[in-house]
Each structure stands twice: as structure tokens, then as C-alpha cells.
Amino acid sequence: MTLSKFALAFAATSVLALGACDEMTDPNNPNRNTQQGAAIGAGLGALIGIATADSNADRRRGAVVGAVLGAGLGALGGAALDRQEAELRDTMGGNVGISNTGEQLIVTLPQDILFATDSSTLKGTMRGDLSALAASMNRYPNTTISVMGHTDNVGDAGYNQGLSARRAQAVTSVLINAGVAPSRIRSIGRGEDAPIAENFTAAGRQQNRRVEIIIVPN
């Protein structure tokens, strides 16, 4: 029987996805991102192995070898994110939000604990958390970091853009001074362009005023 590249690819990725689906979606599973990384890596590895082979026999061998290699690499990336997430939850303050998507960590720092109103000068109480975050970044050097400042929509949009950029830079400077290599980190002001809640209420505006630190494996 002759198997097409697409049929083999579909079979490989479908089996992997079905086998890991329940465990990867369980929010209480501490290894969910390791498993997700392995599954995604295996699927991509199989796909590459199939696409680069000429005969059906070579495609079958390529799918198996690619899946094994891809699963190993994907699991390593997912495991590192799981470990770093666990460490940050242990060391960061309770007001700090930490989200692990399986592809990146998002550390959310509410503006109200970072800065006074209309200020880009960091409060001294946050420097300990930022130092702990920098230490974690240095323990996991194979990542890149984006520091993004956000505001609500109150006031002039241009002013909000500048304020968000200054706040992102203030956080970035603390991380760099704590030893994070400048080549790994970039500072971005988003202003009011990326809200996560409605700006119609005080509670929504408070959520939108934040600095997000996004950590992505290389």
C-alpha cells in the first residue's frame, strides 16, 4: 500500500495529540508543558522526517527518527518553562501574575505596585521581586525577554505611549543592573493599545495598567 507524505504526517501527529491530550490540558499537572513540548516536537519532527525523504520506506523511518528527536528537544524546552514557573511562584510576591502558555512565561506586574500615579520611578518595595526575577532569568540563560509597558485609556494616547515606554525601560534597567545580559532583553511601550480588560470600569482600568515580562525559550 502506498502512503502519501500527508497521510503519514497526519497519522503521526494525530496519535501523539490524542495520547497526550488529557494530561496536557489538566491545569493541575505540573509537567503539562513538558508533555506538550514533547508532543509538538514529536509531531514536527515526524513531519520533517517525512517531507525530506524520497521513498515510502524512507518516509516511515524519517517519521520515527524525527519524532524521537523532536520529542526530546520539545520536552527539554517545556521542562525548563515548568521549572522556571515553579521557581517564580515560590519567590515572587503574591501580587505578581505568572502564566505559562507552554511556549512562553508571562510575568504580569500591576502598575499600582510598581509606580506611583503618573510616575516612571519604581517603588523600592518591588526591587526585591525584580531581583528574584533577574536571578531566575540568569539561571535560565537560553531565553529572550520582552518587557512591555501598558496603560489604560485615560488621558492623551501619545502621553500614555511615552509613559508606558518609560516604565518598561525602568523595569528593564533594574533587570540589567541585576545581571541580565542586555542582548537578551528588549523594552517596549504599548501604551493603551493592548488592554486585557474593559476600560469602562475602574477595576478594568486597573488591570490594564501593568508591565508584562515575557520570557521565551530560544
Image (cartoon, rainbow, N blue to C red):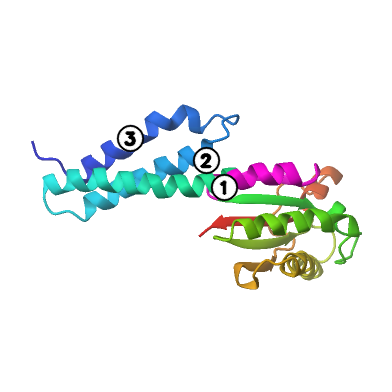
Q: Is residue 197 visible?
A: no
Q: How many marks?
A: 3
Residue 127 location, quadrant: bottom right
Mark nearer the N terminus (3 vs 2) = 3
Compared across the picture, whether 144 is left or right of 70 comes to right
Dot 1 falls on a residue whose secondary structure is helix
Q: Nearer the viewer, mark 1 or mark 3?
A: 1
Quarter of the picture containing the N terminus is: top left
Whether residue 73 appears in magenta in the rendering, the answer is no
Compared across the picture, whether 114 is left or right of 12 comes to right
Dot 3 falls on a residue whose secondary structure is helix
Report the residue marked by disc 3.
Answer: 14
Q: On residue 33, which mark appears? A: 2
Say if mark 2 contacts mark 1, CB within 8 Å: yes
Question: Relative to 5, does residue 122 appear above or below in the rendering?
Answer: below
| Residue at image location 18% in from the left, 47% down from the top | 59
Towards the viewer: 215 or 7: 215
Compared across the picture, whether 184 is left or right of 59 comes to right
Q: On residue 81, which mark appears? A: 1
